[in-house]
Image (cartoon, coloured by chain):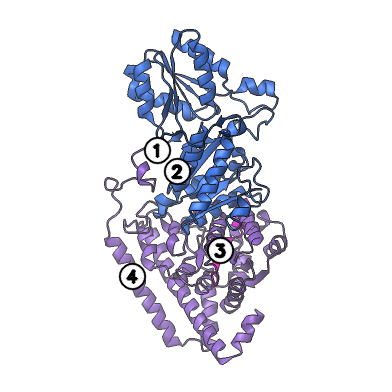
Amino acid sequence: MPEFERDSTTADGADLWKDQLRRTFRAMVTARTLESKLASLYKAGKIVGGVYIGPGQEAISASIGSCLKWDHDIFGPLIRDQAGRTAFGEPMLDATRSYLGSVKGPSGGRDGNIHRGRPNEGLPAMISHLGAMVSVVTGMLLARRIKGCLKGVVGAASVGDGASSTGSFHEAMNTAAVERLPLVVVLTNNQFAYSTPNDRQFACKSLVDRAIGYGVPGYEVDGTDLMATLRIISSAVRDAREGGGPQLVVANVLRLSGHGEHDDASYVPDHLRDSPLGRDCVSVAEQQLLSSEVITEAELLGWKSEAAEEVQAAVAQAQQEAPPDPFADDWAVYSSSQLSQTS
Amino acid sequence: MGEITYIDAIREAQHDLLASDDRVFIYGQDVGDFGGAFKATQGLKKLFPDRVLDSPISEDAMIGVAVGASIEGMRPIIEMQFADFSSVGFNQIVNQAATQFYRTGVPAPITIRLPSGGTPGSGPFHSQMMESVYAYYPGLVILTPATVADAYSMLIDAVALDDPVLYCEHKFLYRWLKAEQLTDNQDPLPIGQARIVRAGKHATVVAYSAMVHEALRAADLLASEGWEIEVVDLRSVKPLDTDTVIASVARTGRLLAVGEAFPWGGVTSEVVSRVTNDGFHLLDAPPQRLNSRDTPVPYHPNLWEAHRPTLESIGAAIRNLLQL
């Protein structure tokens, strides 16, 4: 953070900050628009499988994505990271094709929804087992060190309060710390893992205290506050990029949806919904950016209508495309050609 | 000529892989300056300091790291200190490494070395055979070398493959099995091809890993009783060379499948199932299986000897098969 404060006192720094805030917020708006559409399509029975969205977490997720450079840095998203994917640079069609079951999707129907990725462009495709992607991002960074091309690169991994209880998360954090790799782990504490509240998930005072055990810097932030969140995450990303080793950021919010669209989240008590954690980060950011004149009302309206058009087009295109054909799929499980005829 | 052991072959293969391909690196517990719990990486850290890396005791993260490195075009070799401990990395092996190519089209060329099988006094957690567990999962290749030459050439092949490989090396063979040279003057067989290691006409014994040697000793024993037993070394259990096995059964009419793994399901069941499906008409007797007993691997050598198939129990199983 001190690094950043120094920068933002200069004219250039202030412009960069403003530009990053705008990019980040725009990704939040686009993701919110896309996910609202996906939720509607789910309720209309148009989606193949489940829908998992991240309302309330866009400020955190988009902040990660906007600090990273596509096809240069690495981002291991989790299930509520549409905003981060958008900010990082994932094409929207990847999302609509995956959800709507187009054979042209990134996995051609072999996997779906949030399990999509573009590993060769720095976006590994998550498996369902929580915490498991942290070591994959770590391994991508380690490989770049061995290849001699790690300089200036950052890998970010997104996890939640639930993932923080897994052995996989612990092993990966510790491994990255031992190797002192430029890994930024952003832990979104949204108070519930599916229906399990924090008091059944962990017993420490704050999850940020885990950082001490790994010997890495830890930061805690109000994830409903875009300005605060982006400040903390960009500072952590910068520290990692500059050789400071792994960083842990814990961002506190409330999940403003069910676990998936099949879940009405009736287990979330009213007092939490009414607490500061229950604020909608998109509304908060809107007010922050309008009042500080980072954006204008007209721009905001424009962004919203452009997002709606983009979503409409991406949905329409995916809906026109063919689903996978079991008779056309080669059902190949091996990459090696010499193994393709064997079993 | 000097003597080369099975573990020497593994060490030499890793040396040659590191020397010939910058994409190869070794990651595992104690593999660095210490040279590995079984000395399979002895001296390699000195020669390749940036590509032989000690890992924390974190099998899950070790495999996750390998998957990430594979995305970046590397060819990691992961040494599990014992095959038994790969259970901690099970999720990353079967859900991450095994599914990556199918789900994303990005290959996962990872080799996971599993020091497998029993040795006297090793007990329940340093003796397991894991090949049947991993063979269950689509996308994995499972190799079980039984000779010094195969230990070398199949490890070279494993790293060359674009898919995740479980390379099951048998600890009992490490220093017991010796050869005069690293290769046996024949072109190595391709992955997925079994080898007939002893020709016969009265019965076929299909085995792999250390059990090949027990089966050969049993065949010697039966030869003194006038029986000619054919022994097939599967070499790789996935892919499984059904053709060679069925061709052998066509000659002998009788099948015994031997494995050191636990008896429920697994490689021997798969062999019997395939022969029964595709070669039922070739069988003169019900196909038989012989595995370890259905208990954890016992600690005391007396119990351990009676737990896994041995010369004596394989001999008895063959005699039984010949009388059916």
Identify the element where label 3 is drawn. Answer: helix
Q: Are marks 2 and 1 on the same chain?
A: yes
Point out the residue furthest to the bottom here. A11
What letter labels the chain drawn in blue?
Answer: B
Question: In the rendered structure, the residue with mark 2 lies on which chain?
Answer: B
Give yes or no for contact between labels 2 and 1 (Cβ–Cβ under 8 Å). yes
| Residue A240, quarter of the rendered image | bottom right
Decide which of tag 4 and tag 3 comes sooner along the chain: 3
Q: Which mark is residue A312?
A: 4
Q: Which mark is residue B157?
A: 2
Point out the residue furthest to the front here. B1
Question: In the rendered structure, the residue with mark 3 lies on which chain?
Answer: A
Amino acid at pointer 1: Pro
Residue at numbered disc 3: A145
In the displayed structure image, the side of residue B18 where residue B253 appears, left or right = left
Q: CA distance from mark 2 to mark 1?
A: 8 Å
| Residue A175, quarter of the rendered image | bottom right
